[in-house]
Image (cartoon, rainbow, N blue to C red):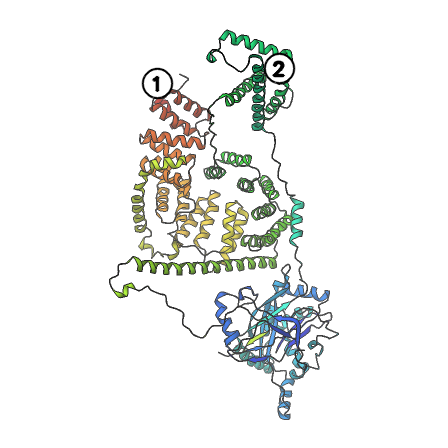
Amino acid sequence: MVCLQVPTVGEKEYPLMFKNGVLKLGGEKEPIPRPKKWPISNILAPGAQNIPDSFIVGGPYEDEDGEFNKTEDREFRIQAESIKKRIVWDLERRCYLDPPAVLSLQKRIAECRYWPVEITRVPMVTSTKGKSSKLDKGDDDGQIFFHGVAYVNMVPLLYPGVKRIRGAFRVVAYQDSEVFEKTKCLFSILRDLGHQANLNKLGPVIPAASSPHSKSVPSRNQKEDKMTKEKDVLRKLSTTLKSQTSETAIETEATVCQNLEGQQYVDAGTFLVMEIELAKALVPKRLPEELASRVKEMIPPRPQLPRRSAGAKKAVEDYHNQITSIAGAILDEYHELFGKQLVDGGVIDQHALEEQKCQLNYELNSSGKYFAFKEQLKHAVVKIVREKYLRTTAFNNLEQLQTFLSELYVYLVDQMHVALNQILSQDSTVIASPTFTSCEQLRLFAHEAEVNEDYDLASVYYQERLARDRQVVQHWLDYGAFCLLMEENIKAQECFREALSLNPSHLHSLLLCGIIAVMMEHYEEAEIFFEDATCLEPSSILSWTLLGLFYEIQENDIRVEMAFHEANKLLKARLAKEKNITEAAEGGGKKLHALSATVLRPVTSPQEDTILVPDEAPDGSSKVQPDSVEPVVTIQLPEEDAAVKLTKKLSPTLSKNKETSQKVMKKTSAGGFDPSHGVAPIPISGLSQPSLTIFMETIHFLMEVNALQFVHRALAHELLCLQEGPSCEYYLVLAQTHLMKKDFSKAEECLREAIQIDYLNPNVWALKGHLCYLSGNFSEAKECYERTISFVTDASEMHFVYLRLGSIYLKEKEYDKAKQTYMLACKKSSSCLTWLGVGIACYRLKEMTEAEDALSEANALNNNNAEVWAYLALVCMQGGRQLEAEQSYKYAMKLELKNEDLLQEIHEVQQMVGFGNPSF
């Protein structure tokens, strides 16, 4: 028999009893679905005991809320619910909770979390007088046989929108102190009922509890609601319970006996499968429509801007069209005056041509066509003034007006010649369009500038991306993340909200709006953003984890548990799916490998001509698949491009890199750890993926957007959830945060711990190289970088490893290695700095042609780099090209070259060749 209690209006709590469980022998499996039954045993009509339209349906174990819902418990659940003996009730009890009872239920769950469900074994009633008197005697003593309890975690019912919990709950021996500690219940409901009446005669005591038509307990669609209303007297009596001694020897002996019987539940691994459902959620959940409307109120969606019909380019095109039209009209007028036929083979005397020109001008002026052509052209010129020169107001003085008119006249005449040449030229002139860097390259250049701490240049690149296309959400998010790095929270908020206005359904925009709202202490807005993100993508681990971190800031422990539980469930499902895909792929790969080996191998014996087939599964008794779990109260009985061309041109120099990497790898394997300091662990997972948690996955996103406030919170949770201690990845992220704050000593401590855990991780050595590079220890940084590139697996950001290693080679005058390293960077992700490195190395190696090609490529990617112009000036002076050398030197000075040594070298070469500086 199972018993629990629920709050009622009165002082007493109402008990719910589940009696007359049916014993099921091993090997029997209940059908799914099957009808639920009324808790009435004396119904004789066939089928009347079944509840209409109410069935027991199954579901995956992983979706349950109980204790046995993990992958490792799957086999145990299958055996317990299908193969071993068990007791099944298939009963459903319904009761009504009025508003005071609902409030009491919420308060009790929030304070106690667990709800006790008691279990006992009750002797069957017989008609023999002797046995009846014996039972009566035992019941008068209040003795309970095999008294156990299951602690049902009711907290999920306080999650927003949750109306139902279902799962398997472990049964343990009933101990008064343990029950009071977990549930604040001082009295056992079974023991209390046993003192009032015989356990076998409980029917007359609570007949209304068994009937769905009871007046005192109105029927409502609600399963097994079981809560108790805590009373103030329990708190007063708690000290009495804790100070209980052996003054009553009889009760102590009964308790020991009860514990021995109840311990059999623990030994057998007994659990109770049950379901509790509410007609209405205790905590209402906001609808997705409401959240979306709130977001729209804060950030109204921005409509797509209509394509402008005007603009500088369009104004020039209109001007060309008007010139073409007027030229055609003038040509027609010329034909009317002088005809279309050319005399003397098309040769026209210059004097005759001047006469025709004067006559044509006279006809145009006298007929008024000249003024008509001026009016026709006026509108196009006005558009050029407004769109091209951005002039919309009057000039302050006459001098400015004359200067502007002179500049405008020159431009209009040049554009007139362009239009006329397009008409009169027989061969169409192909105008080479200027090459622009892509938005992805600009993102790389900006990130380069960030790492090199040139924040002004990084800001220019981010703003250039926005200037090219303001309708791309990612452009705004990247610039907002940069503003977070610079601690410009107001700018970051504007960027994130602009991105969200462009696409209200963009997940990362919602999350970043929530993050910046938390940083600016706008918690109500932050909650709306985070909840809208979880409604928009319920399968997003990132959304649920960030929601949990936000609720932790709000100190809302129940919702923190809800969010993290949902995120962990999604992560487990994803990892299980990935594992199945990997196993299937590995199985297919083995079969394919066996087949190919058989086909390609020469046949020398009959055995070799046979294709191996993997062993098939033995045909034993089919295991019961856990397609469904029964949501009923069940007890187990206590029993047993150009860059590419130049790269190809220079690629022969890269062939030496393989030998260098092999040498470094030998050095790495030889000098990993000193045996005198103990045996260094050799982790097998050095090249495999680390154990992933919801917090580490969130940390990766937070580090990308520079949200360090949330990073530290997530790191704290990551540290708590790692049972075997901090992981290598944990120390890596922690070292990165210290490195961003220029705290080199703490970063070094974290990296030392990371190396002890996994010294085969390339990211560890890359970050240590960055630490040594920033602290000025270039020799050790060089060793770390060389070790990083020698690994088979690349580090996460090899671009900066190549850049800094190449710069160290240049400082140490190892120009061959510098050239190889920079070429590797160009192959992976070319930028102005990578090609500049190649150009410097080639110049030092006296490879002037290749140096000029590399520097030209760098100049094409960024023509505002003073060092590129400086080295181009050196190359041109070495080649004897005076004009180009002077131009390059002029731009290097204009861009304020800051490398004094390089400037001194330029002056020395200028003195040697005798040109290059226009000032002397």
How far across and how far down the image is residue 700, in percent? 49, 49
In this rendering, which labeled residue sits more in front, label 2 or label 1?
2
Q: Nearer the viewer, residue 537 or 751?
A: 537
Q: Residue at x 59, y 11 (%)?
A: 361
Which comes before the other along the chain, label 2 or label 1? 2
- The answer to whether 440 is drawn above or below residue 386 in the figure is below
Q: Secondary structure at mark 1?
A: loop
* Residue 801 visible, this angle: yes
Q: Nearer the viewer, residue 628 or 199?
A: 628
Q: Alpha carbon of mark 2 to alpha carbon of mark 1: how far?
A: 57 Å
Q: Left or right: 835 with respect to 702?
A: left
Q: Nearer the viewer, residue 617 or 102?
A: 617
Quadrant housing residue 250? bottom right
Q: Residue at x 53, y 8 (%)?
A: 354
Residue indicated by mark 1:
914
Q: Left or right: 222 with respect to 724?
A: right
- The answer to whether 663 is drawn above or below residue 317 in the figure is below
* Residue 898 visible, this angle: no
How far across and how far down the image is residue 80, in percent? 51, 74
Q: Left or right: 394 with respect to 347?
A: right
How far across and how far down the image is residue 462, in percent? 52, 37
Quadrant housing residue 685? bottom left
Type of amino acid at the residue the image marks with label 1: Gly
Q: Nearer the viewer, residue 132 or 756?
A: 132
Say if mark 2 contacts mark 1, CB within 8 Å.
no
How far across and how far down the image is residue 519, in percent? 59, 46
In the picture, the disc for residue 370 is: 2
Q: Secondary structure at mark 2?
A: helix
Farthest residue to the top: give it: 351
Type of amino acid at the residue the image marks with label 2: Tyr
